Amino acid sequence: MTRTLAECPAMIFIAHTVPRDAEARGCSPWLVAVDNPFLNAIPGTRHYANWRVAQMLRGAMPVWDYLDFQGLASRDDLERVWFNPDLDAFRAEWLRLWGYGARNPAPVLRHSYLTRRVFARPGLAPGPEMTLQGGTGPVPAGLAAGLVFQVEGVLKKHFGQGGGRPDDWLTPAGAGNPLGLGWLAVPHGPASEAVAGDLAMQVVLIAEPDPASAEP
């Protein structure tokens, strides 16, 4: 089993942004040196990767311009990953350093999104750039994609909202989904491949694990 996103049956999608001066203060190098290795060492995490939006190909630019994929070793690992005490402490430091990019963050930034893998093309290995597509409703029949995740749940970022363990920490996407997308997909070809869905963006890789490295 390699530590690629395609090998993850479930994935937490994290959409976020940072203050305007974050890159000048070394945000991306910090993600490479500190954030990515730490997140990939959390038990139950098979693949954690940091990406940045480079260009919109379809739809309006959302309020988020950074995105993380936190691929789980199994769906059953969700709770122990999401409420890992070391991870909660790390998230608090993240907010101290980088915040939400706004004093009153939009709901999409105050939540993360539980997704389920519904299709993975064998041997898929995205390069340092790829097209991320998303749409509402069910996954379109015949979608030319190498990897598809269905959005199933909304995770409250308890660590940025007073901590603790709220009863509604995970709610069905159908009950309210600030992301506004029902599925996410990565084409199996180059980033220039024809796009589908309501939203499509070219994203560039910041950091990811060595696919051959051992899982925590």
Image (cartoon, rainbow, N blue to C red):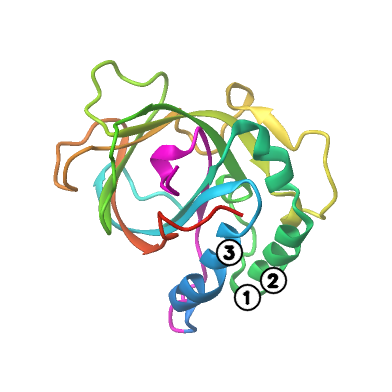
From the top left corner, tell me how far across and down residue 212 is, in percent: 41, 55
The answer to whether the residue labelled 1 contacts the one labelled 2, judged by CB atoms less than 8 Å apart, is yes
The answer to whether the residue labelled 3 contacts the one labelled 2, judged by CB atoms less than 8 Å apart, is no
Up/down of 195 relative to 144, above or below: below
Q: CA distance from mark 3 to mark 2?
A: 17 Å
Residue drawn at 77 percent across, 33 percent down? 168
From the top left corner, tell me how far across and down residue 135 is, in percent: 37, 30
Residue drawn at 25 percent across, 24 percent down? 143
Can residue 43 be seen here? The reply is: yes
Q: Nearer the viewer, residue 126 or 24?
A: 126
Image quarter (top left, top right, bottom left or bottom right) of the C terminus = bottom right
Image quarter (top left, top right, bottom left or bottom right) of the N terminus = top left
Residue farthest toward the top in the current orientation of the protein: 141
Label 1 element class: helix
The answer to which image quadrant residue 162 occupies is: bottom right
Residue 142 left/right relative to 53: left
Q: CA distance from mark 3 to mark 1?
A: 13 Å
Query: Which mark is on residue 102?
Result: 3
Amino acid carrying label 2: it is: Glu
Can residue 21 be seen here? The reply is: no
Choose the circle earlier in sequence order: 3 or 1: 1
Amino acid carrying label 3: it is: Ala
Instruction: Specify whether residue 75 is painted magenta.
Output: no
Label 2 element class: helix
Q: Which residues are magenta?
A: 1-24
Q: Nearer the viewer, residue 124 or 87?
A: 124
Name the residue that disc number 1 marks. 97
Name the residue that disc number 2 marks. 93
Label 3 element class: loop
From the top left corner, tell me how far across and down residue 121 is, in percent: 29, 31
